């Protein structure tokens, strides 16, 4: 199957050159000129890898990387004009898998893409005690048994599992998992939490989701 690369880049010259090199290497290239359309394309097209420019017209590329990483394990390669060590460290902490400094040779970028896609074949696994999540396969197991979650329940549990122990407010969860599209005073988050707990309870995993009264929810650490 043809692998899909999402290129989020506002410079049309770079977009044209990089797209050509990737297509010559056998990849299908999707393009987006800004962060908002890039996030939309990532959600709708489920790319195998994202190439992300740091200097986008609407959002900082690091912020886009953080948003992508909340619900996806897709490999992210950052294009940046900055060569400072601390900035590179911040990019990796934001969720980037690799970065390449401008100006760069397109062949080097293609080589880095191939490396990341080889790594991806092994698949990311989030393991917290008896809980095991496979983000790319969208599978969840507890005590070795599959937990049958709805798409939003899976996104929600994965979001909590990426930083176990951290307490997220309902507003944070609504913003990151539902993209801030829920009406005010909605109880959708609480309903999804209750549904997940019911499914986990059948596998003796009810208590792994912790409610912090007046604040929000967290995934318990072992």
Image (tube, rainbow, N blue to C red):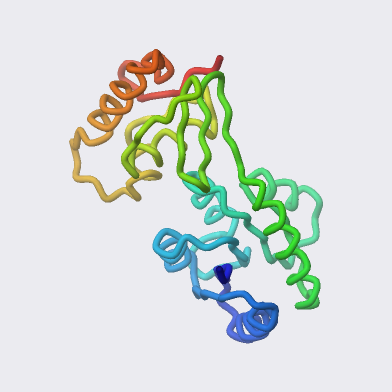
Residue positioned 66% across, 47% down in the render: 122
Relative side of 107 to 54, left or right: right
* Residue 199 drawn at (x, y percent): 31, 24
The image quadrant where one finds the C terminus is: top right
Q: Is residue 59 visible?
A: yes
Q: Is residue 168 above or below residue 27?
A: above
Which is nearer the eye, 208 or 51? 208
The N terminus, quarter of image: bottom right
Does 143 sit above or below residue 67? above
Q: Quadrant of residue 48 in the image?
A: bottom right
Q: How many marks?
A: 0
Q: Estimate the x, y position of residue 151 in percent, counting from the top left.
A: 34, 44
Which residue is depicted at the point 78% across and 68% down? 111
Decide which of 206, 212 is in the foreground and name it.
Answer: 206
Q: Is residue 182 above or below residue 129?
A: below
- The reply, left or right, for residue 151 in relation to residue 119 is left
For residue 190, which quarter of the picture?
top left
**Height in image: 94 above or below 39?**
above
User: Which of the two residues, 31 or 88, is positioned nearer the viewer here?
Assistant: 31
Q: Tell me where residue 210 appears, x and y as whole percent.
A: 39, 17
Depth order, front residue of 83/99: 99
Give left or right: position of 39 versus 216.
Answer: right
**Residue 172, visible in the rendered structure:** no
Point 59% across, 63% down: residue: 50
Could you say where residue 173 lies in the image, as x and y percent from the top left? 37, 37
Quarter of image, res 208: top left
Measuring 73% from the left and 52% from the top, which residue is drawn there?
87
């Amino acid at each position: 199957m043809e692998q899909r690369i999402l290129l989020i880049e506002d410079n049309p010259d770079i977009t044209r050159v990089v797209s050509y090199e990737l297509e010559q290497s056998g990849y299908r290239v999707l393009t987006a000129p800004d962060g908002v359309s890039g996030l939309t394309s990532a959600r709708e097209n489920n790319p195998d890898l994202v190439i992300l420019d740091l200097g986008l017209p609407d959002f900082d590329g690091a912020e886009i990387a953080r948003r992508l990483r909340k619900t996806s394990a897709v490999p992210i390669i950052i294009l940046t004009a900055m060569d400072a060590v601390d900035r590179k460290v911040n990019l990796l902490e934001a969720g980037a898998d690799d970065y390449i400094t401008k100006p760069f040779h397109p062949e080097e970028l293609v080589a880095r893409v191939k490396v990341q896609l080889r790594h991806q074949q092994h698949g990311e696994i989030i393991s917290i005690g008896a809980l095991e999540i496979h983000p790319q396969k969208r599978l969840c197991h507890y005590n070795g048994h599959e937990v049958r979650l709805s798409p939003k329940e899976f996104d929600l549990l994965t979001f909590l599992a990426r930083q176990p122990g951290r307490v997220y407010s309902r507003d944070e969860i609504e913003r990151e998992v539902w993209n801030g599209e829920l009406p005010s005073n909605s109880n959708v988050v609480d309903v999804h939490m209750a549904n997940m707990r019911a499914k986990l309870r059948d596998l003796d995993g009810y208590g792994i989701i912790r409610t912090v009264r007046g604040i929000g929810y967290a995934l318990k650490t072992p």
